Image (cartoon, rainbow, N blue to C red):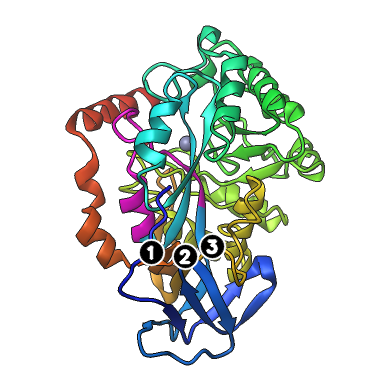
Amino acid sequence: MRETQPERFPRLLLKGGRLLDPGAGIDAAADVALRDGRIDAIEKSIDAQENDRVFDCRGKIVTPGWIDLHTHAYWGATTWGVLPDPFCLASGVSAAVDAGSAGWANFPGFVEFIAKPAAARVYAFVHISGIGLTYPLVGEMEDLRFADVELTAQTALEYPETVVGIKVRQGAAQVGENGVEPLRLAVAAAEMAQTRVMAHIAAGVPLPDVLNLLRPGDIVTHCFQGRGDTILQPDDSLLPHVLEARKRGVLFDVGHGSGSFHYPTGRRAIERGFLPDVISSDLHSLSVHGPAFDLPTTASKFLNIGMSLTDVIRAVTCAPAKAVGLENEIGSLRVGGAADVSVFELVEEETVFVDTHGIEEIGRLRLKACAAARAGDLWTPERAEAELGRPESHTPPVTRLGNEALKRQSGIR
Ligand SMILES: [Zn+2]
């Protein structure tokens, strides 16, 4: 990750906003000053000095830098990949976690060509399949020979600054006849490297079998997918295994994407008091043009189905930081800590949101990104577009063709 600090402005002052930092238990009017990539001061009112750059936050919400726990950022090496900077920095997100785009065989390229040059913070789960998610038309774990426990663990140990866990996808389209064997291998690699597993859940593998193998701190992603083998029973109550897993410390992440958010499933779970631990976009080349779009759009959906603003902000700041063991670095603001800060506006207007099943809901509230500071460098959506280009210009034509083939094959929208 690139450490950046603009030299023209010795200090950046985020002035006049409502500071909402659930990790620190703060919800109050406060100014935040950033200097040399660190938080210089958080006070009720900070007077602007002569050379300060002042960013007007009146009427806006200032939060710790948002963390998108589930993205696919391996551009050019996987069909799913989108570049992290044009998408994250343009939408108020300062940190992206790649969810297993690379496996041991292609992970060094991810570190060198994606994570290191990015202005956003970039972390990753390394896939238990050695080729990661490079080839979308054949399930990466239909053939178990692609999994090498030792080399996967070795990758996690070799890149501790980037790797936050091991990824596995547990749907029939990914594992074929192999059931939960890929998960067993992922857990073995995670134990060897003393890290966590993120398990994608999907139709075709019984969810209790998946949950039974997960350990405290492991993460279920796509928790509100509605395509079969979901968290709900036929009478819409929660599967007892889901409640039991949460009780023992398994975390539940949204991972919206292009096939994994079903409004009725999310609504019913939240009505029963089952809130997601983490809200993530599962941003990739098939979801960035909708229905996920970006993390603020994904998060806004939850504001309109029963989560409070504080709960939503928690689920994109301190909760994902803690989920991947980064809570001492990011996810909450403290003087002397990293100057990763997001600024949003809570817009009250009717917006049509769509899930991955084509179900529309009209929401009254929407979070609109105003800026993301990364190591003290402020990115507004306008600056991101001017310097990094429009996101749609980054998808190669051949990737688009491949994605069309995948859509036809899998039935995703
Ligand atoms: Zn994903």
Label 2, label 3: how far apart the Cα atoms are: 6 Å
Q: Mark 2 is on which residue type?
A: Gly
Residue wearing tag 1: 5
Q: Please say if the residues under marks 2 and 3 sit with CB atoms less than 8 Å apart.
A: yes
Question: Looking at the figure, which quarter contains the C terminus?
Answer: top left
Closest to the observer: 52 or 206?
52
> 267 above or below 363?
above
The reply, left or right, for residue 95 in relation to residue 371 is: right
Label 1, label 2: how far apart the Cα atoms are: 6 Å
Q: Could you say which disc has been placed on residue 338 in the image?
A: 3
Q: Mark 1 is on which residue type?
A: Gln
Q: Which residues are magenta?
A: 68-90
Q: Who's the residue at 72% across and 43% down the image? A: 238
Residue wearing tag 2: 37
Q: Position of residue 308 (x, y in %)?
A: 61, 69
Give the structural element (helix, strand or loop) at label 2. Answer: loop
Closest to the observer: 360 or 275?
275
Q: Position of residue 213 (x, y in %)?
A: 74, 26
Q: Please say if the residues under marks 1 and 3 sit with CB atoms less than 8 Å apart.
A: no
Q: Could you say which disc has been placed on residue 191 in the image?
A: none
Mark 2 close to ligand 1, CB under 8 Å: no
